[in-house]
Amino acid sequence: MKKLKVLHFPDPRLRKKAKPVEGVNEEIRSIVDQMFHTMYEEKGIGLAATQVNIHKRIIVIDVSEKKDEKVCLINPEILFLSDEAETMEEGCLSVPGFYESVSRPSKIKVSTLDYNGNKIEFEASGLLATCIQHEIDHLNGKLFVDHISSLKRNRIEKKIIKLKKEGVLTSRKNTPDYKSAV
Ligand code: GNR
Ligand code: NI
């Protein structure tokens, strides 16, 4: 299966708002399959269609240790966000090599269509809740770096542009860990 290309911040296409899926058919399921393949290849725990330049409301997630718990969300809606928040170190395949603390509601309730187009509702907490919120942000053109200070965000933007110019940011394997440098 072909691995899809992941867009990198500050690509303006990451700012587009994704459109709802009209019906879950074979074309949509094929996109979901390719997104799972890309997410596993890139060692991510989630991927939003926006990141692979497909502006439809589709998300794939697998937060399990064994990488055997696929979660597919189509046209997800958040029904409830807890008042209680939790801070987690976030990363993003579109901001490779950078990690920052982000505070988000710790519990959520979601309504969504699944892989078969059936409407389901469920509650999530912990890493899954964080990941779902991170992915829904992508569908709305938002990135985790929008939750941190503009000083940090601008520094990350400059570093990514520099890495791209140097040709360092073409393959995930070659992506250095810049956490300590930010
Ligand atoms: O792989 C990913 N790890 C991660 C860690 C903490 C919070 C969110 C994430 S999602 C990210 C993959 C990604 O960029 N999804 O959009
Ligand atoms: Ni991301």
Image (cartoon, grey):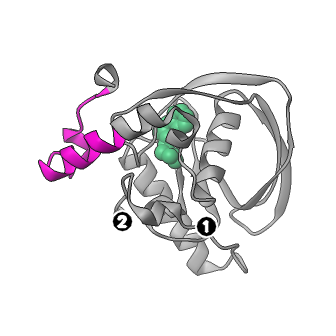
Q: Quick one: which residue is furthest to the top in this view?
A: 180
Residue positioned 77% across, 36% down in the render: 124
Q: Quick one: which residue is furthest to the left in this view?
A: 166
Across the whole image, how many numbered discs are drawn on residues? 2
At mark 2, the secondary structure is: loop
> Where residue 61 is drawn, which disc sits there?
none
Whether 111 is among the magenta residues is: no
Q: Which residue has dot 2 on it?
A: 1
Three-letter code, disc 2:
Met
Whether 157 is among the magenta residues is: yes
Residue at disc 1, CB closer than 8 Å to ligand 1? no
Position in image of residue 46 (x %, y %): 54, 46
> Where residue 17 is drawn, which disc sits there?
1
Position in image of residue 104 (x %, y %): 70, 31
**Horizontal arrangement in the rendering, residue 156 relative to residue 148 (left or right):** left
In the displayed structure, 178 sits above or below 12; it is: above
Position in image of residue 3 (x %, y %): 34, 61
